[in-house]
Image (cartoon, rainbow, N blue to C red):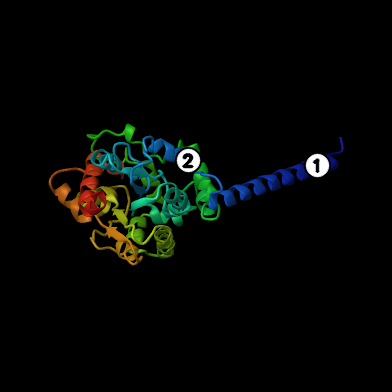
Amino acid sequence: MNWKNTGKKIWKRTWQTLLVLFCTLMVLEVAYRYQWIDFFKTEFNALNKNIKSNQPNVLVFGDSFTAYPNGYVSHFRKAHPEINVVNCSMPGSGPYEMELMASRRISDYPPKAVIYQMYVGNDLTDIDPLVNWGELSFSRNCYWSVKPYFEIFGLFSRRLSGLQSDFDPRKLKQDDAKFSRKLYSPRTKMMIRAESDYINHSIKLKGDMHDAMEDAKASIQYLRELVPKKVPIFIVIIPHFSQVTKEYNKNYEQLSGRKSSMKVNYRFVREISKVKGVNVLNPMRYFREMESNVQQLYYSNDPHLNEVGQKALFDFLSEETKAIWQ
């Protein structure tokens, strides 16, 4: 056997295969960024099974807080059956995904109003992921390093994980076990390992989070430009659980996170409020009021709102957006 010729053939086939894979990836990336096809159709159809063509539309964008089964969107649908509450959310998504899907959804379902749900916990880190080669796995660091350049990887990740993040409300009970460092969401603990102060970085827009916020604001401005000026846009910002009560904050510290700022009018909210033509809604005070009435709004071992929290969010939004439901 001529090992020299065999080696050359193997090398040639390898780089040819890599070239084909890279070209395929580039085509998919361009198709995804320009949404040549509806890459989010699966999630959209699952969340919208009874849309009626002869009714006005209220479009709701967001992440897993909005995609939550029997969550605040479901409450709106029950309260206002005469209006299509079109759920355009997707678990694990952020401002960039909202920007990608907005044009098609607004064209297909011209809205009388738009609600966009943001989350302090990961909207900015979704734009600028946390990379820590000393604490996280090699594969995780590689993924988060290339994700800002290849957005299609985010879609691959959601597909491989069954459309969801590690959050599955079916696995959590309303009266779940007391807070436990051992039982708490693995993803949250991973984020803390990457950067123990990442929540404060998002709250106060420290370091790279400042630039990430500029990108988020650009996505919201794009949404504003897509929708006629007469159509109101409401941006509701869900606080991280550690911002809401001292008890939650102590729990977060037990997970090795840095103590979070608990200011109501924090910089994340103030910056989003600078986008012209949108109404920014901050439920922080309302959430604290509900918690003071011994109503636990967040799961004990997961950073998401539980069913009580989802109902509280619905009540808050109902009051703040009551004009659009009339």
Residue 21 in the figure: left or right of residue 131: right
Rendering quarter of residue 205: bottom left
Q: Is residue 130 visible?
A: no
**What kind of residue is marked 2?**
Lys
**What kind of residue is marked 1?**
Lys
Tag 2 secondary structure: helix
Task: Decide: few, some or many residues near mark 1? Use Cα within 10 Å; few <14, some 14-19, many ≥20.
Answer: few
Frontmost of labels 2 and 1 is 2
Q: Residue at x 54, y 48 (%)?
A: 152
Q: What residue would you read off at disc 2?
A: 41
Residue 266 in the figure: left or right of residue 87: left
The disc at residue 294 is: none
Q: Position of residue 93 (x, y in %)?
A: 42, 48
Mark 2 / mark 1, whichever is N-terminal: 1
Q: Position of residue 151 (x, y in %)?
A: 52, 51
Q: What residue would you read off at disc 1?
A: 9
Q: Position of residue 211 (x, y in %)?
A: 43, 64
Task: Decide: few, some or many residues near mark 2? Use Cα within 10 Å; few <14, some 14-19, many ≥20.
Answer: few
Position of the N terminus, as image quadrant, is top right
Count of picture labels:
2
Tag 1 secondary structure: helix
Q: Residue at x 50, y 37 (%)?
A: 160
Q: Residue furthest front?
A: 54
Q: Is residue 17 visible?
A: yes
Q: CA distance from mark 2 to mark 1?
A: 42 Å
Q: Given contact means CB atoms under 8 Å apart, are the residues at marks 2 and 1 in contact? A: no
Q: Residue furthest left?
A: 293
Q: Quick one: 179 or 317, which is closer to the camera? A: 317
